[in-house]
Amino acid sequence: MPDQRATDGVRAGALREDVRVTFGRDGVRVAHGLWEVKLPADWLSNHADIEALLRGDSTHPDVVSDPESSAVIALLDAQGCIIPRPLTGSVSLCALRERFDRTRGAWYAAYNAHPLWDRLRSGRASRNELLAYLVHNYHVSRTAGAVAARMASRGPLEWRPFFAEDAREEYWHCNAYYFVQSAALGCPDDRIKAYVPLPGSTAFEQHTQQLAEHDAIAHLLVAYFQESSVMFRDAATEFYDEVSRAYQLDDFFRPWREHIGIDLAEQHAAGLAALFTDRVVDAESAARSLALAWTAFFFLCASLDDVLGQAQPGDTIVLRDPESFATTAVRERPDSDLSAIARHDLPHIVAAVCRTALLALGCGREHDEIMIAGRVHERLAGAPQPDVLPASPWTLAIGNLLAESAARPLEWAALIAYLSRRIDVDVDRDELARRLGAAPFAVECARFGELLDRWAASSVVLPRDL
Amino acid sequence: MSKDTREEIEISIARAPGEPIQIKGDLGGLHRDDAKLQQLLDLLGVPKGTEVRVSSRISSVIVR
């Protein structure tokens, strides 16, 4: 899991904190993202400015450069080692993509450094982890067409035709390529379809859905990040072969390999890249889009953590059936269990309740749906609506889940009732209980509870140096 | 579908403002192609003896 804690003094031009610099007799190694650069020792000994940069004693604008120093800085910059200058004024989408390209290598590297991969390669991961990984991929694939459709119907007008075609190309892939059908895994189709998504998968799915509605550029960055990963086809193919051998899965990954071929043949990444035109956006919204794209990446990594959490002894398979969630008792947890970051973000949670109450009210048709949503909103209407992003990505996940449920006002109300038992939020619990009656929405509440657990324990904050 | 289909991706490295070096091609293969990597380093003008190697083991593409 990438741990990108915010620091008060982000120094533009300095080396990122997570760059690994090793000084040796034959040279200095600079490892970050996908690459390691080795600079010759004798050259470095004559370039104190670069050495100071690598030791964290200076930022590169301070460096008095000769052409070779300048080239080294360009290389380190392309590697993503250097904290970029804050965005100011107006930013073209094309420039935003160039900035993102410097960052994404580190994201790919962090994603691929997750311990899950070696466990799967070697067969050390339990069969239940393997299944959870396969189903997670199926869930991510299931999301692609739906999110593209949302972009096609609610995104910027000029992008709608592109994403309408994208939706038509993507929606059936979850069925044709990623549906988990394998005699070796022994799971009936209906139980795979009903498998309750892992919290990270849920957070990713709902975040991308909300981005499609509210931040098309962030959506574009995320989709581009996903599609560009086909550049690793050869490495992925080797990995799939190793996993197949480790778990005797025969030809299970053939559709996955075919899918990569389709992404390449249809040039999905290039198509998305072409949308990064010279159109300009203000720097503040561009920075926000980058942070929200990072949040999607964070949820992908969190999904891998969740897969590890599905470990079971031997070949035991414990599916996340909806029925098993319906019988899980609601775990009450007082405010005092919140991490400092979660506590900091409490106003964002209250604001999300207030904001999504309006969404729920707008979707209300029945008497109780309208009264519940209206009352909740009315009571919280004076709560401040923060105009900055929260500290924790999980705070965004909570808001996303509430927003996605608002189309079903009673389900949304059940989540609010559940939330009010976990944290102190000013709603009339008695009225909620009375109007909800016997509609328990146990599975939805349990899924919400999983996200709330992660939010309450938040230890990672959105980066400020993208 | 051709086995040799490759995603062409453009990368841009600016040595100085107004002096971008653009490389277009199979970025995925770049880290497997020492000659291409050396060509990139030569174009940049980094000091002789500079080496670049891929340090991450890639396992999976990210589904979409």
Image (cartoon, coloured by chain):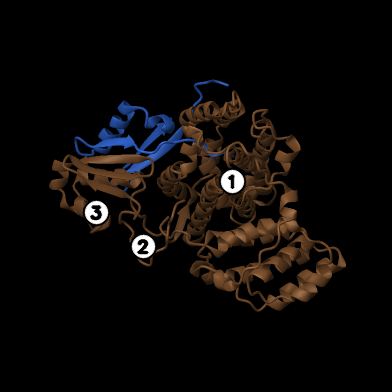
Chain colours: A brown, B blue
- The residue at the point 52 percent across, 29 percent down is A246
- The residue at the point 61 percent across, 62 percent down is A452
Nearer-N-terminus badge (3/2): 2
Mark seen at residue A48:
none
Q: Chain of mark 1?
A: A
Q: Is residue A158 above or below residue A362?
A: above
Position of A260 with respect to A378 (left or right) is: left
Quadrant in the rendering for residue B50: top left
Report crowding for label 1: few under 14, some 14 to 19, many 20 or more residues within 10 A (C-alpha). Answer: many
Nearer-N-terminus badge (1/3): 3
Look at the numbered discs 2 and 1 and tell me whether their residues touch, using CB distance below 8 Å. no
**Residue A119 image point, x, y percent:** 49, 38
Distance from the alpha carbon under mark 1 to that under mark 3: 43 Å
- Which residue in the structure is indicated by mark 2? A10
Nearer-N-terminus badge (2/1): 2
The amino acid type, in three-letter code, at marker 3 is Leu
The amino acid type, in three-letter code, at marker 2 is Val
Task: Give the structural element (helix, strand or loop) at label 2.
Answer: loop
Position of A100 with respect to A252 (left or right) is: left
Position of A131 with respect to B57 (left or right) is: right
Quadrant in the rendering for residue B51: top left
- Which residue in the structure is indicated by mark 3? A53
Nearer to the camera, A318 or A86: A318
- Outermost residue to the right: A367
- Which residue in the structure is indicated by mark 1? A310
Q: Chain of mark 3?
A: A
Quadrant in the rendering for residue A396: bottom right
